[in-house]
Image (tube, coloured by chain):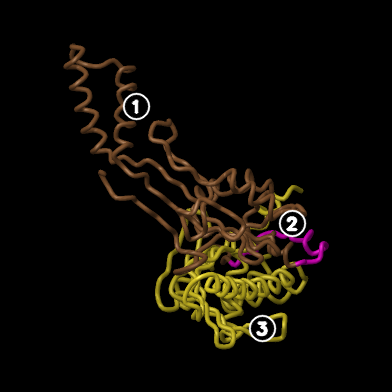
Chain colours: A brown, B yellow
Amino acid sequence: MVSSRDTEVSLGAFRGSISFTKFHVRGDLPADFRDRFVEAIRLRTFRELDATAEADQGIGWCGVDQPFELDLVHEKVFYGDYLNLGLRTDAWRIPSSLFKASFREAERELLGKQGGEKLTRSQKKNLEAVVVRALRQRVVPAMSVVDLSWSLGDRVVRFFHQSPKQHEAMIALFEKTFGLELAEDGAYLTAEKRGLESTLLERLHQLEPMSLATQNA
Amino acid sequence: MDLAPRIERARFLGREFLVWLWYESERLDGVLPLSTGEACELWLEAQLTLVGGESEKSESRLKSETPSASPEAKEALRQGKLPTKAKVRIARGPQTWTFALSADTLSISGVKIPAVITEDGDERFFERMDLVENLEALLADLFGTFLELRVSERFASEVLPGMREWLHGADATHAIARAA
């Protein structure tokens, strides 16, 4: 092996300091949601990367706090009124120095066999793919796991990562899996959730930002 | 109006909420009333980021024991900036939480929760979530108070002048009110 597994397991629901972004689930849960959700989760459970496939990365659900738990049965997912999952993303990360050195060697070999001084653009592209596939056999994919905890009664999802890129990936997978939309928390949804009277809620749209600035600032 | 524009339209209220917490904390010596009749203690501490004024790119990042008490922090507000992120300490009874509050999404990060008793396993998760939800309930209560105030007539007649006086001093407040 070229390197040990590069693993990023974010702290969250079970241990360490807590950082999360809250999302509100829009829509109602189906009546038999527990069975349906487990079935849906199992369809989108994380699958190990295939070194011969084109994809650079794979994404899917795993057990919360247990990235290698991919047999997601009821008791691995439901914690009382919470549905807990890990969002696991594995990606091939081949060090660029390793790729460049391997490519140069493969290029020398090929030129030695076929003759000539340099490869055409398409030959280079094909050779890159061959080198990448060969290197994937020697490296372990980098793994990132982020906890997700869905408080079913409150219709709130806490996702223990704050990068917009991770949010985007999670929202896409969540919506595909459960068929329910997510909306990121903020002033409006907090007001709505708090049950602010509809007349007051309507008045929120008419508000203009206040100014505390000195007039000549 | 669809949900997405409603959410975007109301984002500025998060920043206003943060500056209101700051104002209330200084005005009430850190003891803020809750809608339940109880109270919590709240301070801004350690880190404060303010953005805005002439440009969203104009940012003031202040770090000290109590950055909100520094002249630079008030000056940033006078320049029209509003806080986008602050480290907050909040206590109710024997329980204290510290965390960073991001105003635009009202998200919290780096939360230090009161001590968890359970060592490991599912119970630890439930205990941690319970403490997080207690913190969220405190913040939602304070945010609710702010929103009800913000949409009321009292905001323009009492709260905003009070905040301006806190920031500029009484004379400047009257001048701003006259200009507005």
Q: Callout 2: few (<14), some (14-19), or many (20+) C-alpha neighbours within 10 Å? A: some
The residue mark sitting in front, 1 or 2, is 1
Give amino acid for label 1: Ala
Q: How many marks?
A: 3
Disc 2 from disc 3: Cα separation: 27 Å
- Circles 1 and 2 on the same chain: yes
* B11 lies above or below B162: above
Answer yes or no: do the residues labelled 2 and 3 have beta carbons within 8 Å?
no
Q: Which residues are magenta?
A: A195-212
Q: Which residue is mark 2?
A: A205
- Position of residue A114 measured from the top left corner of the image (x, y, whole percent): 21, 12
Disc 1 from disc 2: Cα separation: 54 Å
| Relative depth, front residue between B50 and A77 | A77
Q: Residue at x 67, y 54 (%)?
A: B7
Q: Residue at x 55, y 88 (%)?
A: B94
- Give the chain letter at badge 3: B
Q: Residue at x 44, y 42 (%)?
A: A48
* B136 lies above or below B33: above
Residue A13 shows in the view: yes
The image quarter in which residue B28 lies: bottom right
- Circles 3 and 1 on the same chain: no
Give amino acid for label 3: Pro
Q: Callout 1: few (<14), some (14-19), or many (20+) C-alpha neighbours within 10 Å? A: some
Q: Which residue is mark 3?
A: B33
Which secondary structure, mark 1? helix
Disc 3 from disc 1: Cα separation: 64 Å
Left or right: A23 with respect to B89?
right
- Give the chain letter at badge 2: A
- Give the chain letter at badge 1: A
Residue B52 shows in the view: no
Q: Which residue is mark 1?
A: A129
Left or right: B127 with respect to A139?
right
